[in-house]
Image: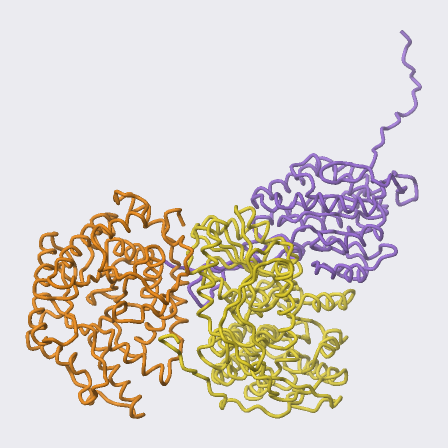
Chain colours: A yellow, B orange, C purple
Amino acid sequence: MSRFEYAPAPESRAVVDIDSSYGLFIDGEFTEAASGQAMKTVNPATEEVLAEVAEADEADIERAIRAARKAQEKVWGPMPGSERAKYLFRIARLLAERAREFAVLETLDNGKPIREARDVDVPTAAAHFFYYAGWADKLEHAGFGPDPQPRGVAAQVIPWNFPLLMLAWKIAPALAAGNTVVLKPAETTPLTALLFADLVRQADLPAGVVNIVTGAGPTGQTLVTHPGVDKVAFTGSTAVGRQIARQLAGSRVPATLELGGKAANIVFEDAAVDQAIEGIVNGIFFNQGQVCCAGSRLLVQESIADELVDRLKDRLGTLRVGDPLDKNTDVGAINSARQLDRIRELTQAGEDEGATRWTSDCPLPEKGWFFAPTVFTDVSAAHRIAREEIFGPVLSVLTFRTPAEAVAKANNTPYGLSAGIWTEKGSRILAMADKLRAGVVWANTFNRFDPTSPFGGYKESGYGREGGRHGLAPYLKGGIG
Amino acid sequence: MTATSPARSTTPARSTSGGTHPATRTADQVAADATAVVGSADLSNRALRTFLHGLSGVDQVGLDGRATVLGTRSIKTTSKAWALDTVIAMTDLTTLEGADTPGRVRSLVAKALNPEPGDPSCPRPAAVCVYGDMVTVAKQALGSAPINVAAVATAFPAGRAGRTARLADTTDAVEAGAEEIDMVIDRGAFLSGDYRKVYDDIIAVREICQQRAGEPAHLKVILETGELATYDNVRRASWLSMLAGADFIKTSTGKVSPAATLPVTVLMLEAVRDFLAATGVQVGVKPAGGIRTSKDAIKYLVAVNEVAGEAWLDPEFFRFGASSLLNDVLLQRQKLATGAYSGPDYVTID
Amino acid sequence: MTPTSTTTAARVDVRKTYKLFIGGKFPRSESGRTYEVTDAKGRFAANAAQASRKDARDAVRAARAAQPGWAGATAYNRGQVLYRVAELLEGRRAQFVADVAAGEGLSARRAEDAVSAAIDRWVWYAGWTDKVAQVAGNANPVAGPYFNLSVPEPTGVVAAIAPQKSSLLGLVSVLAPILVTGNTVVLVASEDRPLPAITLSEVLATSDVPGGVVNVLTGGTAELASPLARHLDVNALELAGVVGAADVTWGELEADAAENLKRVRRPAGESEPNWKDEQSLESILAFTETKTVWHPKGM
């Protein structure tokens, strides 16, 4: 028994009303799915069913795209940018006003710690709308020509790891540029997108500008391959991204693909060690490691490797794993049983292939899908845990001797989303940053996100950028991606 | 980090077991520990510089961020009750004014002896902290009560006096019976790179503390972090003070802004944690100045728990230097007991 | 001494052997194959090397090896090197005019215009090397104590299918923008009109462009494009020249390219554009990645 036990400090879930079932949000109102099919969404921390949501089929998608088309051509496209801007500012404000509600709902549906939903997901989502709102009437200054035009109707499919934030990353720039959208949230985390539909109602956004269709993989497939779509944006696995790229081949529909990663987090012997430890922890245990840009491969200079790993394990001992609604929880639930199985399979492979496994002895809740923070040492570049995206709280530690070796190992992956560098030597940071083949390089920090900062990958991590001025390009004719 | 870095130890950094109390070491042992850590017997300015500048750097933004996250811990119910009592027991109830009078000091002592009239379960502060000339008054007023008298010394707060005067100041306080001495380092010497001067000052003051009749006086070394300006300097000054035998490293005099901050305290907690790993000696930490609310104080306790470890959750190894903090903690304590918000009329003014 | 004949026939010219251009060298196809290239009127012009998939593989390897060095050169240096190419093109303009006139069936006047436009285009792109980052990069004002900068970087190795009809101006319009930021290229020349591409190779070989930065394959577009589209060490695909090529569509190549998520620049339309107007910053940016670097600001 330690001297200072933190009593549970659960966030009240009374701030959210979850309906027992949800329809599709098309043309400004909730409607039943034509198919009549529904699926259940589950709280991963308790395995209780939160709600039933409709599964959209081809007829529903057709209806949503038609609504989006009409809204784009008749209302949203012709509307002056300054007017569009005000709607987006409204949305930003409404999100901030209802931040608590969104945060709690996100935590319930996704399993992420309320501290992260409250301090990262929701405020960053609101900031994203606020940022792009300001672009809506300044597009001619964005560097994409004197009179940039929207592409039209955007089909957007988002993942389950940051449901609301990914929605914001998709919808805000699309709307600012004058497009209308049909967005499909992930099968396991549809609730904040459906609550967002209520916010769209409060904002008086014209009908059809934002349409939310729920469903699983087939729904997404139907959406992105629909001939009525002018633009596809997808965030998710590389496997699905590849499939979408193949399906859109030969068409005139451009895609933005934000896919997987296997980021190297490189720690040099002269790093600010205490901050590097925090960066490593934040890099791989933020959102249970279910982050495409997670720093899942720790590359440590051999001269400090043992010490660093000892300190890291010690630090991990202070991570609190458990009830995501508890404000003191650092690591919450894995989003789905399927994902938990995947993490278990890969960690088992790590053991089988000869890596040394260390797992925090923190207590885990009896119900729900949890996985204790895990670190593998003695990992070689050939091991599956060093190559495949685990998407869980599992860190693989490799060592290097020289900067050139660090670069070679960091780049030795088909992915190229992000990378981290820890050193107190400025010139080394800049040289490393030049050589790392990754779309986001965090030096002496990790997992920072900002609406003004472009995000996206090299190589099989996808193409196109979201965020910042660059994030407008995919939604404008003539823009890249 | 360089080969001489003490942080090379492979022992787990956070400790639940603690280590040797620094005050129990002889001067020779202190010197031997310092020599071993620095990796040089002469402890020249050059050797000290090589060592201190070889310590791992501190990234300001990263440290500030870590402190912010620690500050988001939510402490409720029984944990909060325990934390409030612990804060009181770790407090050095302080008055350090030019206008201090015997009456003012006696009043402070009375508050320390009986912080919550009518509630004998309320703990007492660890010490009262006064100027050296008030030690006799404080000692008399305390009688045999188990509360220490801490005296600021060495030409507090600026420390701008010759060594003779600084040491005489210390001797007076120790001879008057002070159980604890809060000295200031020579920030000018530190900032000009004369680390050996700072080291020698501390050694000399410690020697006087060790000479105290009965038990040695415990030595708290005030870094005045607000004048050291950078976190790198705070880490170096922490190590320098610990090498010279400090029992506690203390943030501030309270006379310079900024005084104690959570990031600086986190940094100093990392330093004592690493010093324990390197030497087996457990040094205490005292943030002082600017901590006024229970909410803030509890954040510091969370930092102690998660950065240094629970071995430091003890008045022997963690103190708050504060004057107005106690009453806020008492108000919170009443709120927890009665469920109703209390008001300033329900705690005594010392 | 025998007096020289006053009735000597016209001099027999020395003809050029057209080969591949890989890694700065001019090899024959490893397959040993050649194919007959004719001029616009169907007369024999040359036997061009008919490159194989193995030649394509070698070209990718050469392009990959050259890429870090080309990207690592300073933008100023790349600009100078590319500008130097324009100087050399000017010096060889007579041959380009002859090649273009014969191959594309243009009048001397129009061939001159096409060559002039190609040289001018090369100069235009050469001037971009040290400006792209300024125009397409950004300092990003993030809400926190961080320095944050986005810069365009080369995507890596680009396989480019050169236009089938416009054998020099189209070729330059496709090739030059890819090189600006530091990409290296495996270029598949126009199947029926490959000679200007080979002549350009000869210019490049005598310029300061490092070997392997540009690699030129002649042969069947369909035969070469497919292995390049599927090659996992190719980062991007420029498909401008697939329209009008036999036995291959840009859609199937794009589908192949999806295997490793290559960046694909689709043809602008279903027929070859008028290359006079095809000069844009967008052509450069299509083969770049935006890299964003964060660093804390603290004392």
Among the 4 quarters of the image, the one containing residue A298: bottom right
**Closest to the observer: C107 or B242?**
B242
Is C121 drawn above or below residue A359 in the view shown? above
Among the 4 quarters of the image, the one containing residue A413: bottom right
Is B113 drawn above or below residue C172 in the view shown? below
x and y percentages locating residue B191 in the rendered image: 25, 52
Whether residue C104 is visible: yes
x and y percentages locating residue A148 in the rendered image: 63, 68
**Which quadrant, please, contains the C terminus of chain C?**
bottom left
x and y percentages locating residue C127 in the rendered image: 60, 47
| Residue appearing at x 59%, y 51% in the figure | A409
**Closest to the observer: A379 or C248?**
A379
**Closest to the observer: A30 or C43?**
A30
Among the 4 quarters of the image, the one containing residue A480: bottom right
**Closest to the observer: C246 or B164?**
B164
**Which quadrant, please, contains the N terminus of chain C?**
top right
Q: Is residue B89 left or right of residue A73?
A: left
Whether residue C282 is visible: no
The image shows a total of numbered marks equal to: 0
x and y percentages locating residue C130 in the rendered image: 56, 48
| Residue appearing at x 71%, y 69% in the figure | A240
Q: In this view, does C192 lie to the left or right of A450?
A: right
Q: Is residue B328 left or right of residue C4?
A: left
